[in-house]
Image: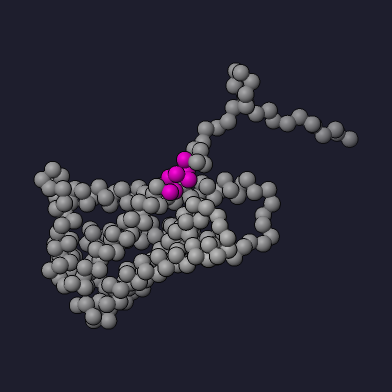
């Protein structure tokens, strides 16, 4: 009977005898990327929502706001130049946020010797279990949103400089409102978990403190969802036309 070999693969070593490890990004750096991009994206989400709400002040106010975004930075920067820099930065931030989150999740899974048989209510929540998929859905929606209301390729009105008419023409179609609603609700779940995680990382307190943090995160998510969804449903119902 053959004797099984007891030899194992010897990891490559450096000339000094140390084990050679493949280079990889530090988890601390990945967490910093998550924090910085998350904060930047949250700021954009709030600012964009406030700008969208200008539609309730009429076509002139909303078109003036859109004109300001196109011309900000002139004459130092060409028209729409700063706006496109912001858009590209947004896409880069979304991509970096997703990549960092995915890498951290994979490392945590590999470092866990045995899978949990039971998860706490927070760990097993919908938002916690779908953070990565939610990020992908939001990223795809951002691309669609750019093609619809920025490049105007998918917009039924599609006239540059007529932002109010572009938006109202778009949200008169219920399938567009449905897609927008699903994306905003996904963003809400993502924000609720993200804000809660950010606040919780500042320090762990008693159960009462944890409950307050969850309430703050939920309130932020609900307010942002309500702000974004108020525009398409106002158009769809004829409140804004």
Q: Position of residue 51 (x, y in %)?
A: 24, 63
Q: Residue most toward the left?
A: 75
Dominant secondary-structure state across the stretch colored magenta: helix
Q: Does 89 sit left or right of 158 as displayed?
A: right
**34 is within the stretch colored magenta:** yes
* Residue 61 picture quarter: bottom left
Q: In this orientation, does residue 33 appear?
A: yes
Q: Residue at x 30, y 73 (%)?
A: 230
Which region is colored magenta?
A: 29-35
Q: Residue at x 47, y 40 (%)?
A: 29
Q: In this orientation, does residue 182 appear?
A: no
Q: How many marks?
A: 0
* Residue 206 picture quarter: bottom right
Q: Could you tell me which quadrant the N terminus lies in?
A: top right
Q: Does 80 sit left or right of 23 as displayed?
A: left
Q: Is residue 24 above or below residue 118?
A: above
Q: Residue at x 19, y 48 (%)?
A: 81
Q: Residue most toward the right?
A: 1
**145 is within the stretch colored magenta:** no
Q: Position of residue 55 (x, y in %)?
A: 21, 70
Q: Could you tell me which quadrant the C terminus lies in?
A: bottom left
* Residue 8 picture quarter: top right
Q: Position of residue 2 (x, y in %)?
A: 85, 33
Q: Residue at x 33, y 55 (%)?
A: 43
Here the colouring is one colour
**Viewer-nearest residue: 213 or 66:** 213
Q: Position of residue 197 (x, y in %)?
A: 49, 56
């Amino acid at each position: 009977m053959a004797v099984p070999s007891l030899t194992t693969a010897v990891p490559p070593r450096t000339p000094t005898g140390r084990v050679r490890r493949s280079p990889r990004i530090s988890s601390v750096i990945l967490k910093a990327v998550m924090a910085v991009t998350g904060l930047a994206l949250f700021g954009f989400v709030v600012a964009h929502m406030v700008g969208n709400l200008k539609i309730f002040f009429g076509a002139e106010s909303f078109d003036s706001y859109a004109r300001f975004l196109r011309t900000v930075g002139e004459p130092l920067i060409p028209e729409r130049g700063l706006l496109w820099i912001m858009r590209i930065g947004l896409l880069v931030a979304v991509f970096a946020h997703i990549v960092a989150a995915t890498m951290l999740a994979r490392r945590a899974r590999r470092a866990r010797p045995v899978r949990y048989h039971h998860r706490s209510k927070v760990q097993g929540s919908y938002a916690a279990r779908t953070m990565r998929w939610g990020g992908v859905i939001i990223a795809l929606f951002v691309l669609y949103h750019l093609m619809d209301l920025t490049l105007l390729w998918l917009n039924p009105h599609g006239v540059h400089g007529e932002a109010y008419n572009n938006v109202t023409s778009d949200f008169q179609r219920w399938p567009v409102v449905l897609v927008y609603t699903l994306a905003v609700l996904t963003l809400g779940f993502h924000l609720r978990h993200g804000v809660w995680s950010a606040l919780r990382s500042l320090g762990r307190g008693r159960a009462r403190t944890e409950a307050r943090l969850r309430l703050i995160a939920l309130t932020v998510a609900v307010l942002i969802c309500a702000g974004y969804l108020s525009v398409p449903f106002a158009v769809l119902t004829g409140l804004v036309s």
